[in-house]
């Protein structure tokens, strides 16, 4: 258990790599025993079984997805699929990040309000919760209708998915300080303002980061979903819709886009995790793994 | 027993204080009833009694963390509320209540920041206080890197940083082991003598109360009353030899009998070790 931090990181990295390798082996293994025939230069392999989801259409070969990344994104295009996806991912990430920051600010502000007013908490928290029971696919067209088919709508959708986990976690986090810490501040005749910034806010940071990690991935989902009705052609959302329509002729493209979305989500998550580690170091908390 | 101190020398003046806790408009507990107590400048007064006798409540009343239902609490000649706003208190709890995101030194600086003291002055004062509790070399550490006793010393340094008129300590060593507790007792006496601060100290432990105090206030449970105030005629400075003096044992016995008479001890407790068990097992 008592690994030095460097060895801890190394072990985590190795575990991750091993898991990815396992997924790839199982993926191709399924195709080997139950997929479509494999054809190479002068050889063929006919899998003995037939597993319906291991077909080339539903589960393309890893190397076909890999190969598609290097191919032009469209016939005659200068740009490779990989280049296109990287650009689209950055575009989507920008929308998600703006929504994420706005959502985090709104979430923290709402929680601060609720922690200082039981009345507001009782009056408004049910609506905050109800807001999240509306499916985003139902809400997105309405937002686009209200704010126009633009990046603004996409950012609002990402914000909408971000603020909720932050609000709920921060209500908890801002109430986390030991009651005696609040008594101590009272004995110093500290103002509410001082109590908030010197005790409640720092004490809530572990809760905040837990929420931000959830929100980071949610904001990306929000941006991708919002790009469709928002009519944004440059992001992953439109790419996924387009590649969906081309699935029969080239399933690798959709898989590549899904892969790009996943990597984007993981990268955003990892960025927040890094921020967490830097912010909370020195507190003597057990280093979390997620 | 208590001779009336003159008003000027009185740091704490409690008269006719009752404290009731209510829920839904109904009185649920009468925590304290008819409390009168004067504490002179520079005194070390312990409040002792069984769980539920309201000794922590009394301490919180002195510190204006809660308000009395009846009666008045004056500190330094003004209402406790005004004294709190004037930042005349230092508080130490059973747990150190240090902020884990602040270094040891920054924890001590917290009250100084609230006071709006200049940065350089904060620096000097925090170092003085850490030197006072002999933790100067640990100022850059974070609380979790220190032992329980050291953390509690940081809490004491923080409480003394504002050079308060009165230091309120609520079972500060209740969570420490016996040996650390005895060392901390000597430490607190040294600090008390060096600073001249008035100290009010809540404890479960008879030996601790007698060793530390100039007076021991014995309380009885439900409703909490002061049953007796025992003077401790032991000289200063006190050290490990003090714990072996016959007079020390006499006062310990006197306090124990006062507790028993007030219903504080069920009669089963006969030795100091039992008091330790009581202190460890219960929360005031």
Image: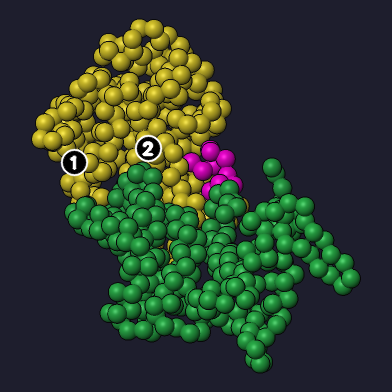
Chain colours: A green, B yellow
User: Does residue A197 appear in this view?
Assistant: no
Judging by the rendered image, the residue that carries numbered circle 1 is B67
Q: Nearer the viewer, residue A8 or A149?
A: A149
Neighbours of disc 2 within 10 Å: few (<14), some (14-19), many (20+): many
Residue at x-position 47% and y-position 73%:
A224
Q: Which mark is residue B169?
A: 2
The subunit carrying tag 1 is B
Tell me which segment is drawn in magenta. B142-152
Residue at x-position 72% and y-position 66%:
A61
Q: Residue B146 in magenta?
A: yes
User: Which of pointers 2 and 1 lies earlier in the amino acid sequence?
Assistant: 1
- Whether callout 2 and callout 1 share a subunit is answered yes
Q: Quadrant of residue A219?
A: bottom left
Mark 2 vs mark 1, CA separation in Å:
18 Å
Q: Which mark is residue B126?
A: none
User: Does residue A208 appear in this view?
Assistant: yes
User: Would residue A75 appear left or right of B203 to someone viewing this image?
Assistant: right
């Amino acid at each position: 258990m008592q690994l030095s931090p460097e060895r801890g990181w190394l072990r985590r990295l190795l575990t991750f790599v091993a898991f990815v390798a396992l997924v790839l082996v199982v993926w191709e293994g399924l195709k080997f025993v139950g997929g479509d025939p494999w054809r190479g230069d002068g050889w063929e392999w006919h899998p003995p079984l037939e597993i319906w989801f291991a077909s080339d259409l539903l589960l393309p070969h890893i190397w076909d997805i890999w190969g598609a990344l290097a191919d032009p994104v469209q016939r005659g295009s200068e740009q490779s699929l990989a280049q296109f996806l990287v650009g689209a991912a950055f575009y989507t990430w920008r929308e998600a990040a703006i929504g994420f920051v706005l959502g985090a600010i709104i979430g923290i502000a709402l929680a601060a309000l609720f922690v200082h007013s039981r009345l507001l908490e009782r009056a408004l928290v049910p609506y905050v919760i109800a807001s999240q029971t509306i499916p985003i696919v139902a809400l997105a067209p309405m937002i686009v209708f209200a704010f126009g088919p633009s990046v603004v709508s996409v950012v609002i959708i990402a914000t909408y998915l971000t603020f909720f986990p932050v609000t709920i976690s921060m209500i908890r986090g801002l109430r986390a300080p030991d009651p005696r810490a609040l008594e101590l501040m009272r004995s110093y005749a500290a103002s509410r303002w001082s109590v908030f910034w010197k005790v409640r806010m720092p004490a809530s940071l572990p809760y905040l980061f837990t929420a931000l990690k959830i929100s980071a991935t949610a904001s990306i989902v929000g941006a991708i979903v919002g790009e469709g009705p928002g009519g944004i052609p440059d992001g992953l959302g439109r790419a996924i819709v387009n590649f969906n329509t081309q699935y029969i002729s080239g399933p690798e493209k959709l898989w590549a886009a899904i892969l790009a979305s996943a990597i984007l989500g993981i990268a955003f998550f990892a960025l927040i995790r890094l921020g967490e580690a830097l912010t909370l170091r020195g507190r003597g908390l057990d280093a979390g793994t997620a | 027993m208590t001779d009336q101190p003159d008003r000027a020398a009185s740091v704490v003046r409690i008269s006719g204080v009752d404290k009731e806790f209510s829920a839904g408009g109904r009185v649920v507990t009468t925590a304290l009833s008819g409390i009168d107590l004067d504490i002179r400048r520079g005194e070390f007064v312990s409040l002792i009694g069984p769980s539920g006798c309201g000794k922590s409540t009394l301490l919180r009343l002195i510190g204006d963390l809660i308000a009395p239902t009846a009666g008045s609490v004056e500190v330094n000649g003004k209402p406790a509320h005004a004294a709190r706003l004037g930042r005349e208190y230092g508080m130490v709890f059973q747990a150190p209540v240090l902020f884990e995101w602040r270094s040891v030194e920054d924890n001590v600086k917290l009250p100084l920041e609230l006071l709006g003291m200049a940065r350089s002055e904060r620096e000097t004062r925090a170092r003085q206080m850490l030197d006072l509790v002999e933790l100067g070399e640990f100022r850059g550490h974070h609380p979790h890197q220190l032992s329980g006793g050291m953390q509690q010393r940081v809490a004491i340094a923080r409480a003394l940083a504002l050079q308060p008129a009165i230091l309120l300590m609520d079972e500060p060593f209740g969570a420490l082991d016996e040996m650390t507790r005895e060392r901390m007792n000597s430490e607190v006496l040294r600090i008390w003598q060096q600073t001249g601060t008035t100290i009010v100290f809540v404890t479960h432990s008879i030996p601790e109360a007698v060793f530390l105090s100039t007076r021991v206030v014995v309380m009885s449970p439900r409703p909490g009353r002061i049953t007796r105030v025992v003077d401790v005629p032991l000289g200063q400075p006190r050290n490990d030899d003090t714990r072996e003096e016959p007079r020390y044992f006499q006062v310990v016995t006197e306090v124990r009998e006062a507790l028993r008479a007030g219903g504080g001890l069920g009669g089963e407790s006969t030795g100091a070790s039992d008091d330790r068990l009581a202190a460890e097992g219960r929360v005031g």
